[in-house]
Image (cartoon, rainbow, N blue to C red):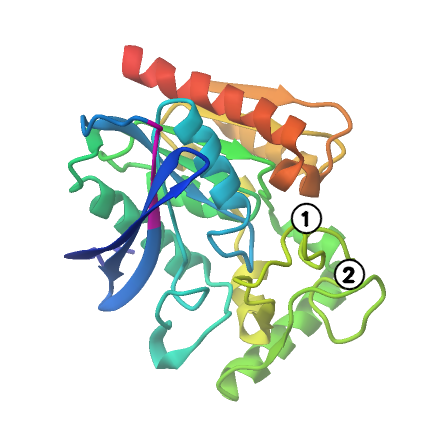
């Protein structure tokens, strides 16, 4: 299926300084909808074109969460970096029919492709050295957006959530549980959406992630910018999305950082077993999924691996 391409409009809206890293708030369009993004530039940037990394985050996330952490890390290592809010999330416009907070793999993949097309037009970006970095749920979307994409050199995945039908059933209550969630999704879709809280304390009812931790804690991911919402209409698209089973579509050099203590490591192994290209996998010991989002030591280690991987592309 051919996905729609970027409408070539963009607006530079503001420039700020953050920890000696220059950030520029920008907007770009995909399928006629305005998306909000942020360009990160290294301290002392001299306006020359830089190798660049597009960074995307976990499900329900906004760009100020783990994408911003890794974008800053990339900028500190001499790269330009770009984050954005997907359609229906954060400061970006809606999905079709004014839908928001819906996890939509096809739409998010399309948005990543549009982001690549947009940044390739910026004077600060070296169009020959563009890379993609996907974290958690967006890892599959990033693979889809990078595969066969002539704009992109290399791809990196941190704590990737790469699922197939077997993993989906194991995580979501077996075949019966998956079927039930798909029924919920279809009913919500017919009703124009059904919004519930995304994060809550451990054991909370009526919440997507009743587990506390990163998304629930104000000093971590529970920041004011976080929507903290989930549209039940997104279940079907998410549960039937199986990126672990289709690694052969990727034709770019790949680096992965993960841990046996993080989410579904078996999905990474399945993907790598079927991937015939150039791949590097680093397995860190005792690192949880949420640690990869904001624990300084683990983010630094993952960012170092990604920076080395992307630099190798510029040297070849």
Image coordinates of residue 263 in percent, x first then y, are 70, 42
Q: CA distance from mark 2 to mark 1?
A: 11 Å
- Residue at the extreme right: 203
Whether residue 146 is visible here, answered yes or no, is: yes
Sequence-first tag of 2 and 1: 1
Tell me what residue is drawn at x 55 percent, y 62 percent.
Answer: 226
For this view, does 150 lie left or right of residue 189? left
Image coordinates of residue 265 in percent, x first then y, are 68, 35
Q: Which residue is mark 2?
A: 173
Q: Classify mark 1: helix, strand or loop.
A: helix
Image coordinates of residue 264 in percent, x first then y, are 69, 41
Look at the picture and state if 44 lies above or below 178.
Answer: above
Q: Quadrant of residue 60?
A: bottom right
Query: Which dot marks residue 166?
Result: 1
Depth check, front residue: 86 or 20: 20
Depth check, front residue: 69 or 236: 69
Q: Which residues are magenta?
A: 38-43
Q: Quadrant of residue 175?
A: bottom right
């Amino acid at each position: 299926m051919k996905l729609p391409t970027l409408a070539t409009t963009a607006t530079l809206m503001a420039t700020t300084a953050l920890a000696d890293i220059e950030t520029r708030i920008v907007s770009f369009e995909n399928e006629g909808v305005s998306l909000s993004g942020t360009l990160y530039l290294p301290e002392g940037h001299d306006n020359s074109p830089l190798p660049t990394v597009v960074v995307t985050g976990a499900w329900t996330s906004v760009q100020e969460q783990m994408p911003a952490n890794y974008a800053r890390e990339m900028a500190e290592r001499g790269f330009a970096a770009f984050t954005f809010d997907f359609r229906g999330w954060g400061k970006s416009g809606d999905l079709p029919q004014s839908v928001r907070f819906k996890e939509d793999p096809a739409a998010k993949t399309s948005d990543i492709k549009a982001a690549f097309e947009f940044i390739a037009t910026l004077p600060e970006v070296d169009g020959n050295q563009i890379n993609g970095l996907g974290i958690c749920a967006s890892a599959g979307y990033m693979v889809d957006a990078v595969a066969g994409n002539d704009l992109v050199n290399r791809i990196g995945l941190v704590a990737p959530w790469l699922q197939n039908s077997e993993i989906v059933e194991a995580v979501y209550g077996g075949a019966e549980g998956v079927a039930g969630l798909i029924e919920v999704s279809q009913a919500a879709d017919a009703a124009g959406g059904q919004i519930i809280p995304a994060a809550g304390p451990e054991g909370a009812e009526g919440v997507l992630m009743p587990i506390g931790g990163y998304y629930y804690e104000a000093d971590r991911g529970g920041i004011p910018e976080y929507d903290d919402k989930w549209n039940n209409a997104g279940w079907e698209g998410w549960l039937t999305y199986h990126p672990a089973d289709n690694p052969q579509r990727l034709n770019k050099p790949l680096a992965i950082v993960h841990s046996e203590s993080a989410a579904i490591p078996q999905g990474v192994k399945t993907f790598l077993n079927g991937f015939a290209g150039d791949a590097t996998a680093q397995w860190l010991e005792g690192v949880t999924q949420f640690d990869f989002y904001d624990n300084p030591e683990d983010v630094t280690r993952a960012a170092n691996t990604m920076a080395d991987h992307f630099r190798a592309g510029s040297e070849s």
